[in-house]
Image: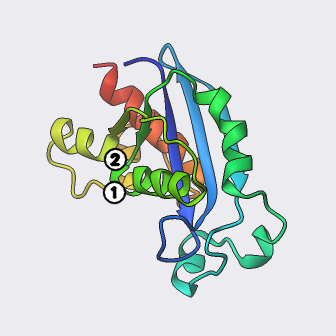
Amino acid sequence: MESFAAIDFETANEFPTSVCSVGIVIVRDGEICDSFYSLIKPEPDYYRQINMGIHGITPEDTVNAAVFPDVWMQVEPLIEGLPLIAHNKGFDEACLKACFKAYMLDYPDYEFYCTLQGARAIFKGLPNYKLTTVAEYCGYYLDNHHNALADAEACARIAIRLYSR
């Protein structure tokens, strides 16, 4: 697989619909060629301290942000025809499906792959399979972890290494 879109969401609270940012990195023919980042007004619109402590996004950051459907209208043309890849796809795929459901949008059954599962299968002997650890093993130092765009880029670089074997 040489073309795909790596995706990462950050959430404001315990609900998967509470996405407050999205990062997308587009890979075509094995090369990163585009990226997209946006803050999103979460639904429900409140923040847990633990979430803010992880990603640093606050209610003030998203008070005037677009809602998910408006952001996704910008994302759709970028990812058209591409499979999606996430590190721990269960989380990001659940967020995406929950947002589509919450806003009563038709979910297009995106093809999703997981760099966490792939790394566990291919990169034997790592001390753990956290995004930062696997990214570093692949030669990419993730210095802004939990920024959705930085995490999506790390995922893309892992996927390039995994799927170009």
Quarter holding the N terminus? top left
Q: How is the image coloured?
A: rainbow
Whether residue 88 is visible, yes or no, is no
Could you tell me which residue is drawn at 78 percent across and 57 percent down?
66
Could you tell me which residue is drawn at 52 percent across and 50 percent down?
8
Kind of residue at disc 2:
Val
Marks 2,1: beta carbons within 8 A: yes
Q: Is residue 158 above or below residue 128?
A: above
Could you tell me which residue is drawn at 72 percent across and 38 percent down?
74
Mark 2 packing: few (<14 Cα in 10 Å), some, or many (20+)? many
Q: Position of residue 79 (x, y in %)?
A: 58, 29
Q: Is residue 11 above or below residue 34?
A: below
Whether residue 118 is visible, yes or no, is yes
- In the image, 143 versus 158, the foreground residue is 158
Q: Is residue 30 above or below residue 66?
A: above
Q: Position of residue 142 (x, y in %)?
A: 51, 51
Q: Which residue is mark 2?
A: 134
Could you tell me which residue is drawn at 67 percent across and 54 percent down?
68
Residue furthest out toward the right: 64
Residue furthest out toward the bottom: 49
Q: Position of residue 44 (x, y in %)?
A: 61, 75
- In the image, 38 versus 71, the foreground residue is 71
Kind of residue at disc 1:
Lys
* Left-right relation of 83 to 52: left
In the rendering, which numbered label is found on residue 130? 1
Disc 2 secondary structure class: helix
